[in-house]
């Protein structure tokens, strides 16, 4: 079982074994006593901290035989040898530390064989599945963009670019690394004359992830951080889950078909088929934010239900567990079939540059200054240093797009 439990990433997985090994929590036993495991004890440190642990996580990822991961893992191995792991490398290795432990335990938990299917299957599957929710997603922003203006503005001609970007928020869900909800194509309405800003790429394992594109100045303070302010994060504990106090980008009132541009709270809907995003000439930093999501069933200590290990994505399995918990716990905070933000955030930045194709215009403040004569009184001629400020002050420089040229 060393492979199952080694480096699971919790502060102390030994808490799991404080549960009596002789009796398994069932609907009847849990009705009298709920196993209190504080949420802070469930939050993993992150990726493995030792060289053997990193190598094991890497091999776990190779065992997934995920075609898109193969070249990435080769690069990670090289950077691991060099001691130069990137942020995404670390996120992926954190995920890799849990993949094999979860898959093995989940398989054991599927076959009714009490008490071993619980102790060696459902219990470690619950721990590994929960640990995965606290590994940041692997997030890649779209490539940098450089375009010439395609639209006039109030400032002048050719002063901005209208990007066709029907989708600005979405998500990915999977079962054991195989997605059943895809990020998709966020720029499917783009044309030759109006391209999109792009589509992010995401990876996780048995964990839903929500991702959003944010323009400069669009996010409130404390939101665009890898550890966001508590007001944006669900509160997790033995009581269940409490939703964040600030649901900054909710989609209430939006339509899945993209026919509604604005939500009931006045924010842009995730999908708007007619959306264009106008950016003026200049450089812009677009931020992409991904956050793992957690469900109430992920957090509650597992009740023994034969053949139904935690982490299952099948609706029938979720419904069975939901029904059992509702029978034994009268007061559980949170909704069983809702997802909540964990506060485990990945950030990536994309540079978008709209070129200024109109040259600035220079003129003289006084037309008489167009002819400027200087008497050479110094040996060797006249130094421009003495006249530089006067020359600069005599010139008026303007730009068609209301920018401030430097003379």
Image (cartoon, rainbow, N blue to C red):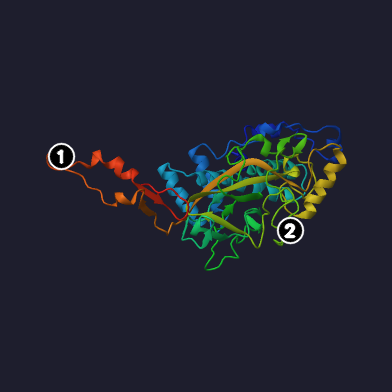
Q: Can you say whether 154 is above or below 334 in the image?
A: below
Residue under label 1: 377
Residue 400 x, y percent position in the rendering: 45, 56
Residue 20 is marked as none
Q: Which residue is mark 2?
A: 255
Q: Residue furthest front?
A: 368
Q: 271 or 323, which lies in front? A: 271
When asked about the image quadrant of residue 115, the answer is top right
Which residue is more in the foreground, 204 or 265? 265
Q: Residues within 10 Å of mark 2 (few under 14, many from 20)?
A: some
User: Is residue 272 at all visible to an observer of this figure?
Assistant: yes
> For the residue carrying disc 1, how many other residues have a C-alpha within 10 Å: few (<14), some (14-19), or many (20+)?
few
Q: Is residue 394 left or right of residue 237?
A: left
The disc, 2 or 1, on the residue closer to the chain's N-terminal end is 2
Q: Is residue 176 left or right of residue 368?
A: right
Q: Secondary structure at mark 1?
A: loop
**The N terminus: image quadrant:** top right
- Whole-percent x, y for residue 8 in the image: 61, 39
The x, y position of residue 32, in whole percent, is: 86, 33
Q: CA distance from mark 2 to mark 1?
A: 77 Å
Q: Position of residue 122 (x, y in %)?
A: 72, 44
Give the answer, above or below, for where 59 lies relative to 234.
below
In the displayed structure, does residue 146 sit left or right of residue 379? right
**In the image shown, does 341 or 106 lie closer to the viewer?**
341
Disc 2 versus disc 1: nearer the observer: 1
Q: Quadrant of residue 278?
A: bottom right
Q: Is residue 205 visible?
A: no
- Residue 101 lies in quadrant: top right
Q: Are marks 2 and 1 in contact (CB under 8 Å)?
A: no
Residue at the limit of the structure toward the bottom, as seen here: 192
């Amino acid at each position: 079982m060393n492979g199952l439990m080694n480096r699971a990433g919790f502060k102390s997985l030994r808490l799991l074994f404080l549960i009596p090994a002789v009796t398994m929590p069932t609907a009847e036993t849990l009705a009298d006593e709920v196993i209190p495991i504080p949420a802070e004890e469930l939050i993993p440190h992150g990726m493995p901290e030792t060289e053997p642990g990193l190598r094991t996580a890497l091999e776990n990822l190779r065992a997934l035989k995920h075609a898109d991961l193969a070249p990435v893992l080769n690069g990670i191995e090289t950077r691991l040898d060099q001691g130069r792991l990137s942020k995404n490398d670390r996120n992926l290795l954190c995920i890799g530390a849990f993949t094999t432990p979860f898959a093995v335990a989940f398989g054991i938990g599927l076959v009714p064989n009490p008490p071993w299917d619980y102790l060696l299957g459902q219990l470690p599957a619950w721990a590994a599945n929960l640990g995965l929710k606290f590994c940041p997603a692997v997030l890649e922003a779209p490539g940098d963009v450089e375009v010439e203006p395609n639209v006039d503005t109030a400032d002048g001609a050719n002063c901005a670019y209208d990007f066709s970007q029907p989708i600005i928020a979405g998500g990915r869900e999977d079962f054991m690394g195989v997605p059943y909800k895809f990020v998709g194509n966020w720029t499917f309405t783009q044309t030759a004359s109006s391209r999109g800003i792009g589509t992010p790429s995401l990876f996780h394992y048995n964990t839903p992830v929500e991702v959003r594109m944010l323009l400069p100045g669009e996010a409130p303070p404390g939101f665009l951080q890898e550890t966001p302010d508590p007001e944006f994060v669900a509160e997790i504990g033995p009581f269940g889950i409490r939703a964040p106090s600030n649901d900054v980008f909710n989609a209430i009132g939006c339509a899945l078909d993209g026919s509604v541009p604005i939500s009931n709270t006045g924010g842009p809907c995730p999908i708007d088929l007619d959306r264009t995003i106008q950016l003026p000439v200049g450089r812009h930093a677009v931020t992409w934010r991904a956050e793992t999501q957690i469900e109430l069933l992920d957090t509650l200590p597992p009740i023994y239900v034969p053949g139904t290990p935690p982490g299952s994505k099948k609706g029938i399995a979720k419904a069975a567990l939901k029904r059992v918990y509702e029978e034994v716990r009268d007061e559980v905070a949170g909704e069983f079939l809702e997802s909540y933000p964990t506060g485990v955030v990945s950030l990536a930045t994309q540079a978008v540059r709209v070129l200024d194709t109109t040259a600035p215009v220079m003129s003289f403040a006084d037309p008489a200054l167009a002819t400027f004569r200087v008497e050479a009184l110094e040996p060797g001629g006249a130094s421009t240093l003495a006249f530089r400020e006067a020359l600069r002050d005599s010139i008026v420089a303007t730009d068609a797009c209301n920018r401030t040229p430097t003379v």
